[in-house]
Image (cartoon, rainbow, N blue to C red):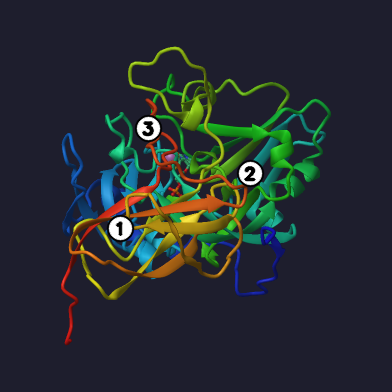
Amino acid sequence: MPNRVSMVDHGSSLAVPSRRRLIGAVAVGGLGLLAKPALAETIDFKVPGGAPTRDYTTTMPEKGRMIVQRTRPPWLEVPFEVFDKGVFTPNDQNFVSWHYAGFPTDPDVATHTVKVHGLVNKELSLSIADIMKLPHIEYAAVSQCAGNSRLYMAPRTPGAQWANGSMSNAVYTGVRLKDVLDLAGVKAGAQRVRFGGLDDAPLPDTPKFMKSIDIDHARDGEVMIAFAMNGKQIPMLNGFPLKIVVPGWCAVYWIKMLNDIEVMDQPDTNYYTTNGYREPVTPLHTIKPTDTDFKLTSITKMFPRSFITNLKNGDSVKVGAPSVVRGIAFGGDNGVAGVDLSLDGGKTWLPTQLGKDEGKYSFRQWQTNVTIPTRGAQALMVRCTNTEKLVQPSTPVWNRGGYMQYVTETTHVVAGEPSGPF
Ligand SMILES: Nc1nc2c(c(=O)[nH]1)N[C@H]1C(S)=C(S)[C@@H](COP(=O)(O)O)O[C@H]1N2
Ligand SMILES: [Mo]
């Protein structure tokens, strides 16, 4: 099925983003909320080499219950059970990641502008209202930090120690970046389009966080300037009021609090392109920790992944009676063709039933019934194949940045007596 990029007319139901919604959350404690979360409970991810026990918080502005790794700038992870409840991640539980703490907690929508400059016929300074006058498009897309699952890299690598919850799925509504570029008129010779947001680097010598994509990619009609997430304005921590969505590519490109679009006549030599977010050009972008002789390239598209969401490590399942096993999958930069489950350590694979297709960039649910014949420890493995026939590998990805893990996941459960009245 083609990606469901559609024209939408929300009529009056989708208003111009307003700052009012933020007042309740931010006025209560302002930055104080960002600095000191309530430590409601803890979670132990049980990884070798120093298990991080993390706290949950319920006091981040506009956020529900999240796993907090860092408060300022925030790194908030989705509690994994959220992914079992539905294919879309609620806005108040969409993960959060920022490089620098210097972003406004209450951007002013009345005065917010997006500057379009560089190799264009006409420099623009667009208000939110100007942008919203363009035709609207809408599609579901997974945003995933390039470092999702870095916590499980063996050996561990530096960077945010995300478990599997620095990913989320939402329906985004916005305008085509192409239409905005056409308003400005891109001149011949354009190479890259670079995005910047309202956040500033903390020191004069610290590079500003920016990312860029090729001009053809920027004009593909899919890359979006989003003003809504799941039909509501984007939460402040997720980039209110405007966010670039590059569907199929890892979230590092999805610049939040967008206020700057630069059409470049040359390659991007910004720190975050030339030094940061790079992966080895090797099979599975994997090296051995001792390897030194390999090229690096910028991480870009995502790869297929799948997870069991209704069972976690250590759970018990029935023996000799059917159990439901279900979860989510995504294809990376294209759709989910199939999700298979193995009960024998990957020797044989059983197809599962796919849930509703919400578009090729979305999470897709899958489910199956399995009967575990023997008592004791069992390893359930789940593997996604995308529509370009790329399959999750059986060996883990490893590179120094801890980027783009997509190994076939294993959930260790224990099979015992059927529960209930028999
Ligand atoms: N302006 C801005 N945009 C940004 C970032 C940032 O630090 N500043 N971080 C990027 C990275 S690395 C990630 S993983 C995503 C996180 O988006 P989220 O917080 O909405 O989940 O935002 C991306 N966009
Ligand atoms: Mo990220």
For residue 186, side relative to residue 251 (left or right): right
The Cα–Cα distance between marks 1 and 3, rounded to whole angstroms, is 21 Å
For residue 49, side relative to residue 341 (left or right): left
Q: Can the viewer see residue 112 in this picture?
A: no
Image position of 376 with respect to 177: above or below = below
Residue at 33% in and 44% down: 74
For residue 340, side relative to residue 312 (left or right): right
Choose mark 2 or mark 3, whichever is in front: 3
Q: Are marks 2 and 3 in contact (CB under 8 Å)?
A: no
Image location of residue 180, percent across then percent down: 73, 46
Image location of residue 19, percent across then percent down: 49, 60
Give the residue at mark 3.
Answer: 402
Give the residue at mark 2.
Answer: 114
Secondary structure beneath dot 3 equals loop
The Cα–Cα distance between marks 2 and 3, rounded to whole angstroms, is 33 Å
**Which amino acid, by three-letter code, is at mark 1?**
Pro
Disc 1 CB within 8 Å of nearest ligand 1 atom: no
Residue at 27% in and 29% down: 155
Residue at 41% in and 49% down: 105
| Residue 59, image quadrant | bottom left
Decide which of tag 2 and tag 1 comes sooner along the chain.
Answer: 1
Q: In this orientation, which residue lies closer to the viewer: 79 or 231?
A: 79
Image location of residue 296, percent across then percent down: 51, 21
Q: In this orientation, which residue lies closer to the viewer: 42 or 21?
A: 42
| Neighbour tally class for label 3: few under 14, some 14-19, many 20 plus, Cα within 10 Å | many
| Residue 377, image quadrant | bottom left
Give the residue at mark 1.
Answer: 79
Image location of residue 51, percent across then percent down: 17, 41
Q: In this orientation, which residue lies closer to the viewer: 212 or 167?
A: 167
Choose mark 2 or mark 1, whichever is in front: 1
For residue 67, side relative to residue 299 (left or right): left
Secondary structure beneath dot 2 equals strand
